[in-house]
Amino acid sequence: MQIGLGFWASKTLLAAVNFQLFSILSEKEKLSASQIKNTLGLKCTDRNVYDFLDTLTSFGFLQREGLMENAVYSNSTDTNFFLDKKKPSYIGGILEMANNRLYGFWADLETGLRSGLPQNEAKHGANDMFEKLYESPERLKEFVHAMSGIQMGNFMAFAQKFDFTKYKTLVDAGGAGAMLSIMVAKHQAHMQCTSFDLPPVAPIAQENIDHFGLSGRVKTANGDFFKDALPNADVVVMGNILHDWDEEQKILLMKKAYDALPEGGAFVAVENVIDEQRKENVFGLMMSLNMLIETGKGFDYTFSDFNKWATTNGFKKTEIIPLAGPSSAAIAYK
């Protein structure tokens, strides 16, 4: 029942993120239900507002003193850190995209399984999700921030767990908002990093680079990783990139990385690598279903799959480093 009705809990959180409730509470610190109702412009009854806020309290997103009309609400410690949109630690971008895009698309999961076709914007005339995303600067920015939000913990962990002592340069292929490059540069003072992506993404990435004051060691580069060669670097990273594509294209992208690396260089895929028995990393399995919704042909994979593709491309050895939550860095050395 909890899983079957899980969309109740999901939509409660997504609505709060969409309202920017946690950002408002971060600024105001404490508000009553009536103050929240007025601030958000809600027209429902007071009882509905109590139910909404008390559900968020029960989940641990809010703290509460008093009851109902006498209650005042504030953010929990984690909510204040991760879901205040004004903080650099904000990870809510992926939740915004979940609310605005994915929530409706997942209603068509059965159709996706029956047809093997994407159930996103591509279902309604676009060639693929990326074509539709790049039509709108606002939609593109939301997507880029979503990718940063879901991966931020992984980028921070990778920047500290991977041994960078033998390397000097890094290229993040499909770098989106440049957050991986920024985290590596922040934690590894000797590294020069390049975030490589399509031209419309560069201004968003540059904004993040400037915000962190790292323009001296983090640059952007424009290109299409299917049409263009990747810039040469000691380390080539792809974060949530391989899973977008079918096996043939996965192998092709790994070949692009191989060609950009020197002897001893490392290719790194930061993704939700599925466990070999395919029963522990449930998030990875559901992310793979999300690739059906988004691309039709993409899928997440096990480390054994990664090893096979690495061997096909001539890499000498591989390893895997657990990162944050269900994600890992699958690494292939040339």
Image (cartoon, helix red, strand yellow):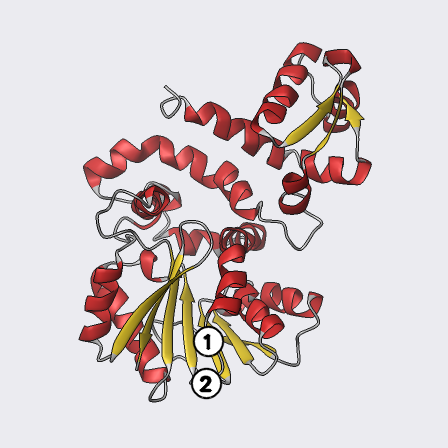
Name the residue type under label 2: Lys
Q: CA distance from mark 2 to mark 1?
A: 7 Å
| Dot 2: element | loop
Vertical relation: 31 (above or below) 158: above
- Residue at image location 51% in from the left, 85% down from the top: 168
Vertical relation: 62 (above or below) 138: above
Name the residue type under label 1: Asp
The image position of residue 204, as x and y in percent, is 60, 63
Residue situated in front as seen by the camera: 256 or 317: 317
Vertical relation: 181 (above or below) 73: below
The image's mark for residue 166 is 2
The image position of residue 131, as x and y in percent, is 42, 56
Residue contact between numbered discs 2 and 1, judged by CB atoms under 8 Å = yes
Q: Which residue is mark 1?
A: 163
- At label 1, counting other C-alpha atoms closer than 10 Å, the crowd grade (few under 14, some 14-19, many 20 or more) is few
On the question of residue 229 being in view, the answer is no
On the question of residue 219 being in view, the answer is yes
State left or right for residue 270 relative to residue 29: left
| Dot 1: element | loop
The image position of residue 186, as x and y in percent, is 62, 71
Determine the image quadrant of residue 59: top right
- Residue at image location 44% in from the left, 58% down from the top: 323
State left or right for residue 127 relative to residue 191: left
- At label 2, counting other C-alpha atoms closer than 10 Å, the crowd grade (few under 14, some 14-19, many 20 or more) is few
Determine the image quadrant of residue 120: top left
Vertical relation: 159 (above or below) 301: below
